[in-house]
Image (cartoon, rainbow, N blue to C red):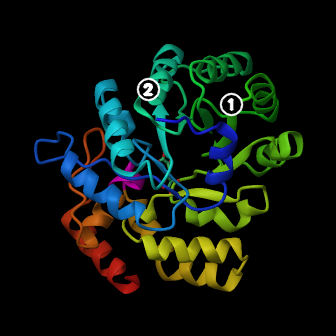
Amino acid sequence: MTLMPPDVLADRLESGLLSFPVTHFDDALEFDEARYREHLAWQAGFDVAGLFAAGGTGEVFSLTPAEVDRVVRVAVDEVAGAVPVVAPATGGTASSAAQARAAQEAGASGVLLFPPYLTEAGPRGLVEHITAVCRATDLGVVVYSRANAVLSDAVVAEAADRNPNLIGLKDGVGDIERLTRTYARVGDRLIYIGGLPTAETFALPLLQLGMSTYSSALFNFLPEFALEFYAAVRAQDRAAVYRMLDDFVIPYLDIRDRDRGYAVSIVKAGLTAAGRDGGRVRPPLSDLTADELAELTALVGEVS
Ligand SMILES: O=C([O-])C(=O)C[C@H](O)[C@@H](O)C(=O)[O-]
């Protein structure tokens, strides 16, 4: 398969909304390939700029390395002709680099580098971590700033200088000063992707900070709503954005905030609420309660 050049991937990703599909499990909590394929084919039928297989919403933290490889290969096989597939790189530096290599072998178009697990890390170590992963692949790499890898403007600038295939920064923190410093320093050398939980909530203000796109978990089960929301953000139609926030996103957040980890669980529940059976989440996440699912089903019904 021909490799998508990193600059081409960057142009594609920044031009539209980004899909972060859930990973389906069967009743025994094993990967359910048939339902996953069906979901991806449906998602890829909408106007979406990239599909991030086994992302945070795809419960990458609950998949074994072999399962990650299988999920990525299935995604490439199912949709790569239509939409670029971006694969995850997770864990410590060695396992992240190995996953970046595997992503290229699997025919993915790019890599999303997640924070390393558990340990704290300083700026020099984070630059080395990003560099090792970028050097493990010819694919474009997007680095996710979050948790124990919150990246300063200096780290982002040095990593971008050292690694031509580092194409983007995904932000899961929402620190306005940090983002302002980063965009002022690094500018259009990178693309910027909003990646806070339920990213629609922050999309309009973050557009001003250089984020032309965001990862939409809502796109999983309300693709038309998510695309309408994205169009309103890009048009800076404040009235439409705040109407949709008020009608759906904020009541949705009220349910999401009832338990830790629900930012992912509620997406699978949302699919079920929309009549598409998202199935269950794996531990350590918990599914919504029956009452919460009923509340979400009523809310989804109001906007579908
Ligand atoms: O890795 C992930 O799945 C994310 O963090 C993206 C999510 O889709 C998040 O942006 C959201 O909940 O909208």
In the rendered image, residue 269, in percent from the top left (x then y), is placed at 28, 62
What's the residue at 53%, 19% (across, down)?
Answer: 119
Viewer-proximal residue among 245 and 65: 65
Q: Earlier in the sequence, mark 1 or mark 2?
A: 2
Query: Where is 235 relative to 177, above or below?
Result: below
Viewer-proximal residue among 42 and 123: 42
Viewer-proximal residue among 44 and 273: 44
What's the residue at 74%, 26% (across, down)?
Answer: 159
Quarter occupied by residue 102: top left
The C terminus, quarter of image = bottom left
Along the horizontal axis of the image, is 256 left or right of 168? left
Residue 116 can be seen, yes or no: yes
What span is colored magenta in the figure?
259-266
Which numbered mark, 1 or 2, is in the foreground of this view? 2
Checking the image for residue 246, the label placed there is none
Checking the image for residue 105, the label placed there is 2
Magenta region's main secondary structure? helix
Identified by mark 2, the residue type is Glu
The residue to which callout 1 is attached is 165
